[in-house]
Image: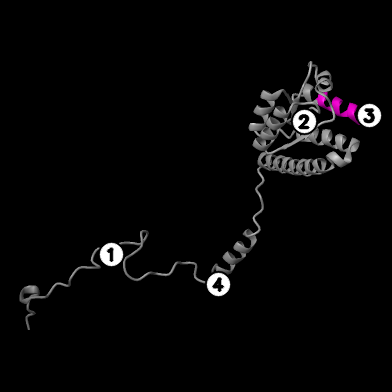
Amino acid sequence: MENKRVLSLLGLALRGGNLAVGEEPVEAAARAKDARVLLLAADAAENTRRRAEHFALAGQCLWLRTPFTKEELGMALGRTSVALTAVTDTGLANAVVRRLAEGDPARYAEAAAQLEVKARRAEERRAERLAHEKNVRQGKRKKNPERPAKKAAERRAAPSRGADPRPAVRRGRPGPGARAKPYAHSHPVKKGKGSFRKREG
């Protein structure tokens, strides 16, 4: 019964475009990091098993040998025979491996637990992405926990209301907005004999 459910899930994944069938499509999906689990037929050759292991290592995903023969997989997927497939959707991969674990817990329970964790993390990332997109649409910004403390420090450093709001006068060269004094750096003129008329007494 569980085997039929697994095959129906694989057919559903194929119709939804979430299943790669055959060695070349599976290799492409694995190298693109799109594959979530690789499924190998029970009677697949040893060379196919080694390639599946290599693809899973390259794609950083799981690979499992299923209880189905190549003919059984082929009939479920509309082919003559299928030795290797790859599920590219996290939710469907989790459902397929969970069904396999229900039929044979000793063989597939560990893989089902790993995929459960991956599916939960993927759902959390998806929820975070959706929340971020919603905030961007609404113009909301992420709250900075350091911002209130920074504002409080600025308020403490600001002058009180009774203080003189005018800036302190700097000694030396005037600032860019200050008024220039044209004779500030000139030398005083010495007064000579002919500077003033002698006052008549």
Q: Please check the rendered image and state whether residue 109 is part of the magenta-colored stretch, yes or no.
A: no
| Mark 1 or mark 3, earlier in chain | 3
Quarter of the image holding residue 126? top right
Q: Which residue is mark 4?
A: 162
Label 2 sits on what residue type? Leu
Q: Are marks 1 and 2 in contact (CB under 8 Å)?
A: no
Looking at the image, residue 155 sits to the left or right of residue 76; the answer is left
Q: CA distance from mark 3 to mark 2?
A: 19 Å
Q: Which residue is mark 3?
A: 1
Q: CA distance from mark 4 to mark 2?
A: 78 Å
Label 1 sits on what residue type? Lys
Q: From the image, state whether disc 4 or disc 2 is nearer to you.
A: 2
Label 4 sits on what residue type? Gly
Q: Which residues are magenta?
A: 1-12
Residue at the far bottom: name it: 201
Label 3 sits on what residue type? Met
Q: Are marks 4 and 1 in contact (CB under 8 Å)?
A: no
User: Mark 3: few, some, or many residues within 10 Å (few <14, many ≥20)?
Assistant: few
Q: Position of residue 110 (x, y in %)?
A: 81, 43
| Secondary element at image label 4 | loop
Q: Position of residue 103 (x, y in %)?
A: 90, 35
Q: Which residue is mark 1?
A: 181
| Mark 1 or mark 2, earlier in chain | 2
| Secondary element at image label 3 | loop
Q: Which residue is mark 2?
A: 39
| Mark 4 or mark 2, earlier in chain | 2
> Which of the two residues, 139 or 48, is positioned nearer the viewer here?
48
Q: From the image, state whether disc 3 or disc 4 is nearer to you.
A: 3
